[in-house]
Image (cartoon, grey):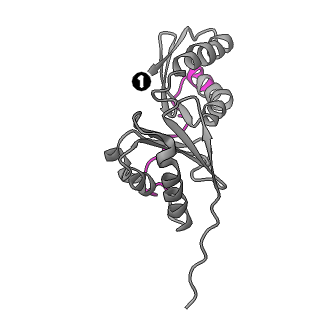
C-alpha cells in the first residue's frame, strides 16, 4: 500500500518589534488573506488544532494565525534559543499532515458589514489597505472594534499585543494616518491592551 505524500512545508523565522514574539512564516497560505485568529490562552484555542498543539509547550503564552504565518508569544523568562527549533518542528510536522489549522465551523467576522456607516466603511478600508499589511509584516493584526464620538477603537493582536512599541505605532502611525485621511476621526485607541 502506498503512503500518502507529505505536503512540502518550508518554514523560516522572522523577528518583530516584540522581543517575546517570533513569526514562523510558511510557504503557503494557512488562512484566507485578511483573516486572522488570535488565541490569547489555551482555552481559547479549542477551535484550532494547531494552536492547541502549540499550547502544549509550557513556554507558549499566545498563538496568532494569519495569512501564511503563525506568531508565537512566549513567556518573558524563557529564551527563544531554547525553544524556537522545537516550536518550528512542531508547526512543520503539523502542517505536513495536511490538517486544517482552524476548525471549519469557526465563524469569521466579515471585514465589511452592510450596516456600517460610511465613515466606518472608510475607516475599515484604510485599516485593511494601508495598516493591516504593515502590522502583519511584524507578526500581528489590527482589527476594527468601534467608532464613536470621533474615537476609533481597535484591537491589537498577535505580536502587537503587549509589544513595547505598539503605543508608538498606534499614535504616531495609525492615528496620524486616520486623522489625516478622515477629518471625522479625532483619536485612535487600543482596546484590551
- Residue 13 falls left or right of residue 78: right
**Up-down relation of residue 9 to residue 144 (above or below):** below
Structural crowding at the residue carrying mark 1, measured as other residues with C-alpha within 10 Å and reported as few (<14), some (14–19) or many (≥20): few
Residue 7 percent coordinates (x, y): 61, 68
Image quadrant containing the C terminus: top left
Image quadrant containing the N terminus: bottom right
* Tag 1 residue: 193
Q: Looking at the image, which residue is at 41% across and 33% down?
A: 76
| Front-most of residues 41 and 142 | 41
Name the chief secondary structure element in magenta.
Answer: loop
- Residue 63 falls left or right of residue 28: left
- Residue 44 falls left or right of residue 96: left
Residue 53 percent coordinates (x, y): 40, 56
Res 120 → quadrant:
top right
Q: Looking at the image, which residue is at 51% across and 37% down?
A: 21
Q: Looking at the image, which residue is at 61% across and 76% down?
A: 5
| Front-most of residues 106 and 101 | 101
| Front-most of residues 67 and 2 | 2
Magenta-tinted stretch: 101-122
The number of numbered discs placed on residues in the rendered structure image is 1
Residue closest to the far bottom: 1
Per the image, is 111 magenta? yes
**Up-down relation of residue 94 to residue 124 (above or below):** below
**Up-down relation of residue 169 to residue 49 (above or below):** above
Amino acid at each position: 500500500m502506498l503512503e500518502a505524500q507529505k505536503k512540502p512545508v518550508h518554514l523560516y523565522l522572522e523577528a518583530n518589534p516584540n522581543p517575546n514574539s517570533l513569526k514562523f512564516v510558511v510557504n503557503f497560505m494557512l488562512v484566507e488573506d485578511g483573516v486572522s485568529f488570535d488565541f490569547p490562552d489555551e482555552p481559547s484555542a479549542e477551535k484550532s488544532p494547531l494552536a492547541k498543539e502549540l499550547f502544549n509547550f509550557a513556554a507558549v503564552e499566545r498563538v496568532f494565525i494569519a495569512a501564511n504565518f503563525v506568531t508565537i508569544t512566549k513567556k518573558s523568562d524563557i529564551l527563544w534559543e531554547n525553544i524556537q527549533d522545537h516550536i518550528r518542528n512542531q508547526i512543520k510536522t503539523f502542517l505536513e499532515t495536511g490538517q486544517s489549522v482552524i476548525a471549519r465551523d469557526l465563524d469569521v467576522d466579515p471585514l465589511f458589514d452592510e450596516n456600517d456607516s460610511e465613515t466606518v466603511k472608510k475607516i475599515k478600508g484604510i485599516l485593511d489597505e494601508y495598516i493591516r499589511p504593515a502590522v502583519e509584516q511584524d507578526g500581528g493584526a489590527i482589527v476594527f472594534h468601534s467608532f464613536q464620538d470621533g474615537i476609533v477603537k481597535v484591537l491589537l493582536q498577535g505580536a502587537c499585543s503587549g509589544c513595547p512599541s505598539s503605543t508608538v505605532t498606534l499614535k504616531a502611525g495609525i492615528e496620524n494616518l486616520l486623522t489625516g485621511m478622515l477629518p471625522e476621526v479625532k483619536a485612535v485607541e487600543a482596546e484590551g491592551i
